[in-house]
Image: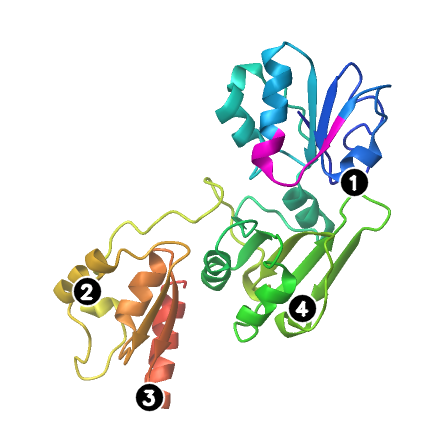
């Protein structure tokens, strides 16, 4: 199992398939390596038939090489291979992942980034993670690329970094607004989209990577929020609402008639994306102030 690195020269493009009797990979991966004489190749499309072919060779003890992008253990094919054949039978040689390469191109650390895959998955989960967190990498797929993300996030104050064909001579890394992304045809070469809140993209030092740790407590006391004339959802009611809603990363919560925004803020502290609706300008200002005070 060889990952073709997203950094130029990160993975050898020569004899990685030497000795194999079957080589499986995308067309561009197969074109990038020197194939042994007489080797059988399978161009990856549907995964199940390719795994069935691999199984035929594995059962006979014949050598197989699988080519993939970047680090195949990170939202990649290693999971499917390990489930089918057992991890002890795999020799994985990882390249530089597209996520690591994209953040390197823009000079940002990514230990505090959240990574969401929209490849073969519901795009709404990635969209809501982008709304909730200031630094997100989205692994794209057919029907879930920069244009679709841009259309969903055009009003959310984010900046996109669209990284295409990383590690190749055709590499492109472009900063665009979500509206600009939505208006373009990006083709099939997009590797990853970084979705950034420019003001918060360089976060504090972390001890735990990825999603920020959950709050130490919830159903906070009323004095944790600015409110008008005691017009605030009492903490006992918030506790019940939060327990029933179970907000988490990837969810979207609407708080209509948000008042002080206490319920909205508590849902956001638990990782959900939140849209709070309040009628009056001073009410909107109060919700925003409470959100800022709690770092969401």
CA separation, marks 1 and 4? 25 Å
Judging from the image, what secondary structure is the residue with disc 2 in?
A: helix
CA separation, marks 4 and 2? 38 Å
Q: From the viewer's perspective, is residue 46 above or below residue 190?
A: above
- Residue 136 placement: quadrant: bottom right
Q: From the viewer's perspective, is residue 110 above or below residue 247?
A: above
Q: Is residue 73 visible?
A: no
Residue drawn at (57%, 49%) of the image: 119
Q: Which residue range is magenta in the image?
A: 41-50
**Which residue lies under the disc numbered 2?**
238
- First-in-chain label (4 vs 2): 4
Rendered location of residue 274, percent (x, y)? 38, 67
Residue drawn at (33%, 83%) of the image: 278
Q: From the viewer's perspective, is residue 172 above or below residue 183?
A: above
CA separation, marks 3 and 4? 31 Å
Q: Which is more foreground, mark 1 or mark 3?
A: 1
Rendered location of residue 27, percent (x, y)? 77, 39
Q: Nearer the viewer, residue 200 or 196?
A: 196
* Residue found farthest to the top: 61
Judging from the image, what secondary structure is the residue with disc 4 in?
A: helix
**Which residue lies under the disc numbered 3?**
279
**Which residue lies under the disc numbered 1?**
28
Judging from the image, what secondary structure is the residue with disc 1 in?
A: helix
- First-in-chain label (1 vs 3): 1
- First-in-chain label (1 vs 4): 1
Instruction: Identify the image quadrant of the N terminus.
Output: top right
**Which residue lies under the disc numbered 4?**
181
Rendered location of residue 168, percent (x, y)? 82, 44
Mark 3: few/some/many CA within 10 Å (<14, 14-19, 20+): few
């Amino acid at each position: 199992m060889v990952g073709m690195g997203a950094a130029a020269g990160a993975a050898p493009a020569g004899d990685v398939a030497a000795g194999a009797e079957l080589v499986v990979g995308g067309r561009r991966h197969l074109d990038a390596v020197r194939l042994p004489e007489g080797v059988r190749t399978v161009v990856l499309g549907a995964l199940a038939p390719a795994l069935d072919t691999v199984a035929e060779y594995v059962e006979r003890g014949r050598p197989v090489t699988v080519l993939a992008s970047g680090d195949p253990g990170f939202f990649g094919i290693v999971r499917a291979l390990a489930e089918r054949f057992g991890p002890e039978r795999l020799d994985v040689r990882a390249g530089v992942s597209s996520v690591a390469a994209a953040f390197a191109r823009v000079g940002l650390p990514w230990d505090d980034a959240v990574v969401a895959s929209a490849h073969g998955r519901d795009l709404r989960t990635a969209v809501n993670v982008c709304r909730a967190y200031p630094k997100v990498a989205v692994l794209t797929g057919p029907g879930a690329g920069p244009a679709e993300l841009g259309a969903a996030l055009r009003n959310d104050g984010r900046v996109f970094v669209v990284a295409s064909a990383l590690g190749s001579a055709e590499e492109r890394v472009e900063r665009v607004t979500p509206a600009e992304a939505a208006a373009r045809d990006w083709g099939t070469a997009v590797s990853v989209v970084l979705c950034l809140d420019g003001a918060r993209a360089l976060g504090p030092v972390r001890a735990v990577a990825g999603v920020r740790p959950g709050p130490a407590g919830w159903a906070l006391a009323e004095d944790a929020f600015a409110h008008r004339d005691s017009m605030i959802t009492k903490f006992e009611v918030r506790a019940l609402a939060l327990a029933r809603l179970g907000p988490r990363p990837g969810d979207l919560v609407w708080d209509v008639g948000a008042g002080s925004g206490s319920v909205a803020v508590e849902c956001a502290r638990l990782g959900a994306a939140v849209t709070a609706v309040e009628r009056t300008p001073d009410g909107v200002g109060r919700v925003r102030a409470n959100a800022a005070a709690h770092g969401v």
